[in-house]
Amino acid sequence: MKPAPFDYEAPRSLEAAIALLAQHQGLARVIAGGQSLGPMLNLRIAQPSLLVGIRHLPELRDVRQTADAVTIGACITHAEIEDGRIPDPTGGLLPYVARRIAYRAIRNRGTIGGSLAHADPSADWVSALALAGAHVTVCSPRGERQIAVAKLLLGAFETQIGTDEILVSVTIPRLSARARWSYYKICRKTGEFAEAIGGVLVDPDNGIRRAVVGATAGAPIVLEGNAALPGCDVAALWAANIDDPYKRQMFEVVLRRAADRIAA
Amino acid sequence: MSMNTTSGRGIGARLRRREDERFLRGQGEYVGDIRLDGMLEVAFVRSAVAHARLRGIEKPAGFEDRVFTAADLAGVRPIRAVSGLKGFKVSEQPVLARDKVRYVGELIAMCVAPTRAEAEDIAAQVFVDYEELPAVSDMLEGRKPGAPLLHEAWGDNVFLETFVDGNIAEIARRAPVKITRRLRTARQCMSPIEGRGVVAQWDRRLDQLVVISAAQMPHITRSGLAECLGLDHGKVRVISPDVGGGFGYKGILLPEEVCLGWLAMHLQKPVRWLEDRREQLTANANCREHHYDLTVYADNDGRLLAIDCEATVDAGAYSSYPFSACLEAAQVASILPGPYKFDAYRCRTWSVATNKPPILPYRGVARTGVCFALEVAIDAVARAVGREPWEVRLESLPTREMMPFDNITKKHFDSGDYPECLRRAVAAIDVGAIRERQRRGEPDGRRIGVGFAIFCEQAAHGTSVYYGWGIPMVPGHEQCQARLTPDGVLELRIGAHSHGQGLETTMAQVAHSVLGIEPENVRLIHGDTALSPYSTGTWGSRCAVMSGGAVAAACKEMAKRVAKIGAHLLQTDVSLVRVADGQVIGPSGSVTLKEIAYTWYRAPQNLPSDVDPGGLELTAGYKPVRDTGTFSYACHAAVVAVDVEIGTVEILKYVVVEDGGVLLNPMIVDGQIYGGTAQGIGTALYEEMPFDANGQPLASTLADYLLPGPTEVPDIVIEHMETPSPYSEFGQKGIGEGGAIGPPAAIANAVNDALKDLGVEITEVPITPARLLSAIAAAKVRSAA
């Protein structure tokens, strides 16, 4: 279980990193914390010819606040969010989720941007940031563009991010003081990837009623508006797409339990 | 001779483990830490399919001399682990596949390079031409006529069929209660933190192959290597350094070890292979897969009358060395009755060859499966007769007055109080409080339940038990070589080896109890065939009894010799001295072991004229008074909460009451129980190596193969009983495996207790959410019908 040969570069700037990706035309992979890509390299599931290390780039560790949102660099770690070292615009949702990602050793190195770009449907940020209504900013030689986290995944391990683009930051809108959220996941054991994720967010001042069902076969299912109200039978909206009765039951339960926690 | 048991450092003391000093500081030396000059690394090409004829193997161009196949290994013999049991069919396991492959992960070629990554690069370029054959992925399918054949010459896929035919017809006809269940334990993988690993080199000076291997039975590994490589034993030395867990897996001779031995001789360079976790999971460490069709007959009180069982074990493709492919199934037949007394017994077993890795003995061996099968069935009996499960068990347990007790399969329980063990567990878990809590219901809507499992553990069983199996390894006497060094340090050499047991500590405690020598002045030397007496090694919970007995025998002999010299130095008669506190003590003075040793080695002019010229270096042997084994036993009790919506099981409380006889070091025994119970919880709730219909393993990393972690293992409450064994040196019994035996039964029974109102009964482990929810759904369908 050793990786196939690859080259490694640690460019001095974001610009240089983007240039390297462009030069290698899809054969290069970005590596930040390496908590998912590392095992994939060892298992030879991923065999890039070049790894572009970005963890050290200051541009990707930037944190900016505005009146409406907080933007955090892609290479901020789960542990930094867990420990409250990053401003939290969500009234506790971000550290709550961060604390429950895998194990501390993984959280010490794993990054928020890396987790989103890796696009494992069972990973927490994919669902939690969709619930929060966040968007990511990606950068390429053509400039910057924004993608809503809810629309980021095209499928399992597949995103809208192009092979010459780098996810540079995540922007999370501020919730009002009256906002209430809940996030409920089922794991076989502590630290494992989720079997099912349910999240509900109600922010009356911002007109948000949103529910998320995650750890599906692909992108999380985001329900907006009245359908997401606690107690609504939303299962019918999506159950038709999930054949496995066990999986369906898991999704129904997490969504209901998340909703119950909001109502409580 | 006086025993030094009161100093607080001998037998019975919770002495801290001396080996932990290096383990906890990262200073242990494992195979993976060993680097020799010019050492090359090996990666294997493994079969990608479960069953195929090999049409050809193409070495990549330019790497012909770095890739080795069966055709290169001239003279290397296949691994043959034969059983002498009547009807056993022999499998020949080529160390590299020749004409056929019989499981995914079977070795096909060996690639060598300066680094493992480069060796894997070469392995990835080896082309194997398979002619695929239909695979046997399920043991029951494999038993059927017309199933694809693994070993064509056999005519079927059955390694061995056994039949114990007690006449049960009359009792079965009259029995008011009959419970029939179909039960399964999943295929699992033993998961020591350290995987297997081998470094091999040829020693030109000694004309000897040196194999450094993570082995728990180094002398047996040596015998296996000598046989396969066609070398005499003198040309093979096996060194087992620190070993990071074994559990049975590291007692097995692996084809990889034979390959590396051949390669070191062929290249005349040191070579190394370190097993990675994918190899361990998918190709090597498989264990536990049993199927039971079990019928239990009882009276209206739930007292057992008879047991009738058909058990099938999925033995995998080959018979592994030295325990063979029949160990599990034949064990099932002899130990299924567990700790109980009843009147009639019938059991048929099959060891079935399938296109999976060979099944290997794992901590508890067949006991975990039989305990699960029988104890789940007994709870069903209790529900049928409307009594508490523990009350029903009391009806059938042998009492203290019956000891020693020969059960229906002639297992000889040496001592103990089984009913008392159960009663203590009932009290410790507080059944009454749980029943009350069940009546109230849980605020979070979960359902709680309590479950028990009681079992015995035969340990240190010797020649009389094993010779009948006719397998490559039969234990006999155990030896210890003892040597007092010139400065009075006691060196002990034993052929068993620690893979976590803490023998460096416990054997020093034994020596302290006999000689009074300070434990820190005792050095245990083990894990090297060149430096230790032959032994079958560390398996079957035998070291406390066998190595402990051998160390005691050697120390007693040493005491005689030092007493003679000491008496002479004290100018008194040997009959007037005693050996204690590390000294020879006479009527009017004493002399230390150090002074005596100095005299023997450095000042022989001061020795008595009639001194034993054998000196202070000796070998002594040991065999228990009776070698049918010690029987430790335990009751496990679990309280669980079941979330019936998502199928999860949380262990709220876990109690173990165990009787291991006289405990050499109760702290180490506690550690054995904690660790074993954690593994048993894995068997109960998490661990499973599934295969698809084509024989492809479906768990290849620890993300797919779930092991319990710290948050899944509750605080375990342990209570000790200490009924001495009448047959061992100090009354000690083997206890190494029990922790891993009880949990699947206790937890399944607790789950079934929690869900009894729903009519749900779990009969398969691990109890995964999918399995639990499907059982709940099926019960709903039944009750609606």
Image (cartoon, rainbow, N blue to C red):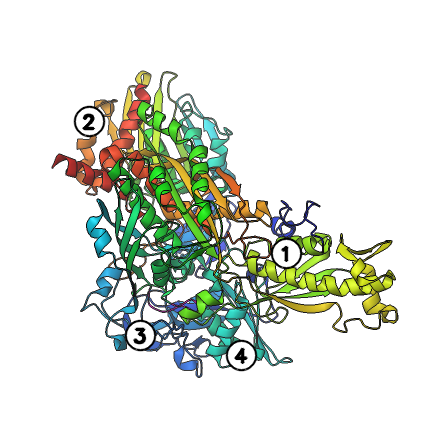
Mark 2 to mark 3: distance in Å?
56 Å
Residues at marks 2 and 3 on the same chain: no
Q: What element carries label 2?
A: loop
Is B319 included in the stretch rendered in magenta? yes
Rendered view: A226 above or below B606: above
Which chain's residue wears label 3? B
- Residue that carries the numbered disc 1 in the rendered image: B507
| Mark closest to the chain's N terminus, 4 or 3 | 3
Residue B489 x %, y %:
75, 60
Q: What stretch is highlighted in magenta?
A: B316-324
Rendered view: B751 above or below B172: above
Give the residue drawn at x 16%, y 35%: B783
The 10 Å Cα crowd at callout 3, few under 14, some 14 to 19, many 20 or more, is many
Res A21 visible: yes
- Residue that carries the numbered disc 4 in the rendered image: B265
Mark 2 to mark 1: distance in Å?
66 Å
Q: In which quarter of the image is residue B623?
A: bottom right
Mark 4 to mark 3: distance in Å?
26 Å
Amino acid type at mark 2:
Asp
Mark 2 to mark 4: distance in Å?
71 Å
Amino acid type at mark 4:
Met
- Residue that carries the numbered disc 3 in the rendered image: B100
Q: Residue A233 carries which label?
A: 2
Q: Nearer the viewer, residue B127 or B88?
A: B88
The 10 Å Cα crowd at callout 2, few under 14, some 14 to 19, many 20 or more, is few
Of circles 2 and 1, which is in front?
A: 1
Q: Is residue A225 left or right of residue B532?
A: left
Q: Does the residue at mark 3 contact the one at mark 1 (Cβ under 8 Å)?
A: no
The 10 Å Cα crowd at callout 1, few under 14, some 14 to 19, many 20 or more, is many
